[in-house]
Image: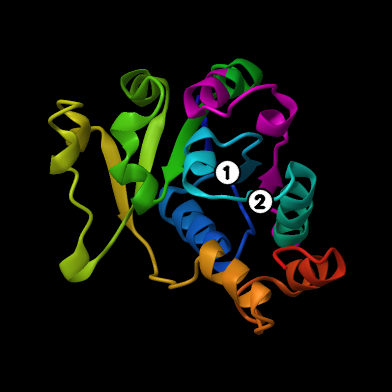
């Protein structure tokens, strides 16, 4: 029996933007995924070390729900927000495998910046065993190079699926900066997300 191929895109989503949606749809089509599950992080331990302010989970979750509402292949899970303590990918994948059962294959999507820090994740080797890790590649001269990870994770370059996706130069950091300066974020986020940010006065 053919297994259900489920994509998983986790992240802080502070806020979610069109780049996230374009990448998710592109990978869904290329890998033939049945659906892509968006999982906002509850307490993203690595992000909290790097960023001074991460918006409340309720706001990030609400924006993700608004952003994916029009795509029947996109779903939202609150499992990391509901789970107490820091958010670790291996815990999320283990919980998903238990919930989805043996009939599902999990494709865990990782952005290029996060992929570069993959060796710092909790139990990265066990994560590679538990699911298919899909790295978002960089085409052209700035190609994603997995060889740097080989020192700490031997064989990792042969176990991660690299997929080149459309290069969309949008970042959540830039969006937050633009909002704080009173600049437009139209065409960077879905319209519903733009309205939500304005209504709740986020990132000011």
**Is residue 43 or residue 33 the one in the foreground?**
43
| Residue 148 sits in quarter | top left
Tell me if 192 is positioned left or right of 168 in this view. right
| Residue 204 sits in quarter | bottom right
Q: Is residue 42 above or below residue 18?
A: above
Tell me if 39 is positioned left or right of 30 in this view. right
Residue wearing tag 2: 74
Label 2, secondary structure: give it.
strand
Q: Position of residue 179 (x, y in %)?
A: 67, 74
Q: Is residue 200 above or below residue 81?
A: below
Q: Residue at x 74, y 47 (%)?
A: 61
Q: Residue at x 12, y 30 (%)?
A: 151
Label 1, secondary structure: give it.
loop
Q: Residue at x 70, y 57 (%)?
A: 68
Foreground label between 1 and 2: 2
Looking at this view, name the residue that lies furthest to the right: 199
**Is residue 115 or residue 120 the one in the foreground?**
120
Q: Position of residue 191 (x, y in %)?
A: 75, 75
Q: Is residue 2 visible?
A: no
Q: Mark 1 packing: few (<14 Cα in 10 Å), some, or many (20+)?
A: some
Let me know if residue 118 is in the magenta part. no
Q: Position of residue 144 (x, y in %)?
A: 23, 54
Q: Mark 2 packing: few (<14 Cα in 10 Å), some, or many (20+)?
A: many
**Is residue 151 or residue 78 the one in the foreground?**
151
Q: Which residues are magenta?
A: 70-94
Residue wearing tag 1: 34
Among the two numbered marks 1 and 2 on one chain, the one whose residue lies closer to the N terminus? 1
How far apart marks 1 and 2 lie (CA) works out to 9 Å
Tell me if 184 is positioned left or right of 142 in this view. right
Q: Which mark is residue 47?
A: none
Q: Position of residue 28 (x, y in %)?
A: 50, 52
């Amino acid at each position: 029996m053919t297994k259900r191929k489920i994509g998983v895109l986790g992240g802080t989503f502070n806020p979610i933007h069109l780049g996230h949606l374009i990448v998710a749809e592109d990978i869904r089509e290329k890998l033939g995924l049945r659906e892509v599950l968006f999982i906002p992080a509850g307490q993203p331990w690595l992000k909290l070390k790097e960023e001074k302010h991460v918006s409340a989970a309720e706001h990030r979750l609400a924006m993700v729900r608004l952003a994916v509402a029009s795509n029947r292949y996109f779903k939202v899970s609150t499992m990391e927000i509901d789970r107490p303590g820091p958010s670790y990918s291996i815990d999320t994948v283990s919980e998903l495998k238990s919930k989805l059962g043996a009939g599902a294959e999990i494709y865990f999507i990782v952005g290029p910046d996060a992929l570069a820090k993959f060796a710092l994740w909790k139990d990265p080797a066990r994560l590679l065993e538990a699911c298919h890790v899909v790295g978002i590649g960089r085409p052209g001269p700035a190609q994603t190079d997995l060889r740097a990870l080989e020192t700490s994770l031997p064989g990792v370059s042969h176990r991660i699926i690299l997929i080149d996706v459309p290069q969309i130069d949008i970042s959540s950091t830039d969006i937050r900066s633009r909002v704080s300066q009173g600049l437009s974020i139209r065409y960077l986020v879905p319209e519903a997300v733009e309205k939500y940010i304005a209504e709740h006065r986020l990132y000011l």
